[in-house]
């Protein structure tokens, strides 16, 4: 059993006021159990003003997290908010680590070493990985997830890429115990019996084009040809004009891997003469369809995911709920960017402790046709775990 104590503050500039508000909410949540860890999601200025550092120094356990477009806990949500979840348990142990700098030339070594450091603090192999990874222009989140999947031996990996309100992600930060960095990852390993149940919804059915194509040439996240024609030519045949555009992050591909898992959404990050750089690795032979995302699609898929999660929580029990929707969804519904957080908070109410944070790329397992877990990276998706 894991108990979740939640707290939040909108006091960006007054460190003492922020700390007093957080302490009061933690105290109201009851006492800590034997093992504890903190997860923080916040507007980037909380790092700059010292609130995150003060929080890490004040709490008697490890704290990890990242900057986000917005976050929510029970009854409170906002773009300029700091949200804190304290996970505390008598029978589940927690261990954290901060990686070395991740680069295009070396993605593996920093993550392998960080995993080994955290694993060395546990008595047994972990049962779950919570990952906070950097959003980078030259390293895909999918590649980072694949390394974590390999080093963890296929145990569930749930997490996010950092993000912020800038177009270049220049203020996106990952932090652990007061240290903040643009290009490092923070890992949280769970040791003990846990029962996570995962939910993902990307795009409303009515927003998915019926015409599909087969990937005939791809290299990692670079999509080159579909149906043996250049992918840019394919887009043009569908009426998608790419001339002059750097990317169309709100016009995703839906990828059917053909392995019994539900299709995954990937954004188009960049157009080149070779093809399209996408949010995740796309295998040759996968079936793809173009989709679009609008306000109604965002709100509908949020409601669908939360409804499914609540039904599971009520039927089979729940310690807490953690939701990670893509931050592009918040941009799509702008200027009503808080509406998805508001909907989630209203639906969950006080039934279960919960935290939501926006993601620069979602790491969330999916299930194959035999209900086996497959770790997967997503874009534009509402991901959620019920613990």
Image: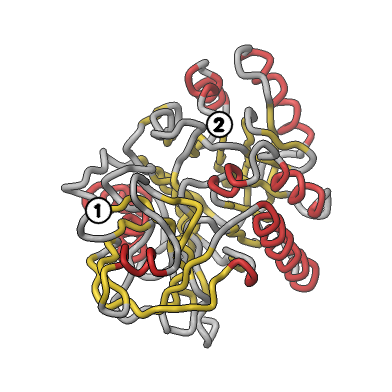
Vertical side of 325 occupied by 80: above or below:
above
Instruction: Name the spot of residue 366 as percent of width and height, x first.
Output: 51, 71
Residue that appears at 19% across and 48% down:
106
Foreground mark, 1 or 2, reads 1
Q: Could you classify mark 2 by the number of other residues whose Cα lies within 10 Å: few (under 14), some (14-19), or many (20 or more)?
A: few
Q: Looking at this rendering, what residue extends furthest in the left direction?
A: 105
Image height check: is 311 above or below 77?
A: below
Query: In the rendered view, would you say 51 is above or below 259?
Result: above
Mark nearer the N terminus (1 vs 2)? 2
Residue 222 percent coordinates (x, y): 27, 61
Label 1 environment density (alpha carbons within 10 Å; few <14, some 14–19, many ≥20): few
In the orientation shown, which residue stands out farthest toward the bottom?
370
How far, Cα to Cα, is label 1 from label 2?
49 Å
Q: Could you tell me which quadrant the N terminus lies in?
A: bottom right
Disc sitting over residue 34 in the figure:
none
Q: Residue 60, which numbered label?
A: 2
Q: State the image coordinates of residue 136 (x, y, percent, origin top left).
A: 33, 42
> Which disc, if any, is residue 272?
1
Say which residue appears at 59% left-offset and 46% top-offset. 332
Establish if 130 lies above or below 205: above
Q: Nearer the viewer, residue 351 or 293?
A: 293
Q: Nearer the viewer, residue 198 or 316?
A: 198
- Residue plotted at (48% across, 57% down): 251
Q: Secondary structure at mark 2?
A: loop
> Residue 188, can we see it?
no
Instruction: Tell me if residue 215 can be seen.
Output: yes
Q: Quadrant of the C terminus?
A: bottom right
């Amino acid at each position: 059993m894991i108990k979740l104590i939640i707290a939040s503050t909108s006091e960006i500039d007054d460190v003492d006021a922020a700390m007093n508000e957080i302490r009061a909410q933690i105290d109201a949540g009851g006492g800590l159990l034997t093992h504890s860890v903190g997860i923080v999601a916040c507007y980037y200025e909380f790092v700059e003003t010292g609130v995150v550092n003060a929080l890490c120094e004040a709490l008697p356990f490890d704290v990890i997290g990242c900057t986000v477009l917005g976050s929510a806990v029970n009854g409170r949500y906002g773009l300029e908010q700091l949200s804190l979840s304290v996970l505390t348990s008598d029978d589940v142990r927690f261990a954290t680590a901060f990686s070395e700098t991740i680069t295009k030339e070396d993605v593996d070594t920093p993550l392998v070493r960080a995993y080994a450091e955290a694993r060395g603090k546990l008595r047994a192999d972990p049962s779950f990985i919570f990952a906070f990874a950097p959003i980078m222009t030259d390293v895909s989140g999918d590649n980072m997830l694949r390394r974590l999947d390999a080093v963890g031996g296929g145990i569930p990996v749930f997490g996010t890429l950092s993000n912020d309100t800038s177009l270049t992600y220049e203020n996106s930060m990952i932090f652990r115990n007061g240290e903040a960095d643009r290009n490092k990852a923070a890992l949280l390993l769970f040791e003990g019996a846990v029962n996570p149940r995962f939910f993902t919804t990307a795009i409303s059915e009515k927003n998915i084009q019926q015409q599909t194509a087969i990937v005939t040439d791809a290299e990692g996240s670079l999509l080159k040809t579909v149906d043996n024609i250049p992918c840019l030519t394919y887009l043009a045949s569908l009426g998608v004009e790419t001339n002059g555009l750097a990317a169309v992050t709100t016009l995703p591909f839906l990828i059917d891997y053909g392995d019994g898992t539900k299709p995954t959404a990937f954004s188009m990050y960049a157009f080149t003469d070779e093809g399209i750089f996408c949010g995740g690795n796309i295998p040759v032979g996968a079936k793809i369809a173009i989709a679009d995302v609008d306000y109604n699609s965002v709100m509908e898929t949020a409601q669908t995911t939360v409804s499914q999660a609540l039904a599971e929580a009520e039927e089979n029990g729940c310690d807490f709920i953690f939701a990670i929707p893509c931050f592009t969804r918040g941009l799509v519904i702008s200027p009503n960017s808080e509406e998805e957080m508001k909907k989630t908070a209203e639906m969950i109410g006080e039934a279960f402790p919960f935290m939501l944070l926006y993601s620069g790329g979602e790491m969330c397992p999916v299930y194959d046709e035999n209900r086996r877990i497959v770790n997967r990276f997503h874009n534009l998706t509402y991901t959620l775990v019920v613990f």
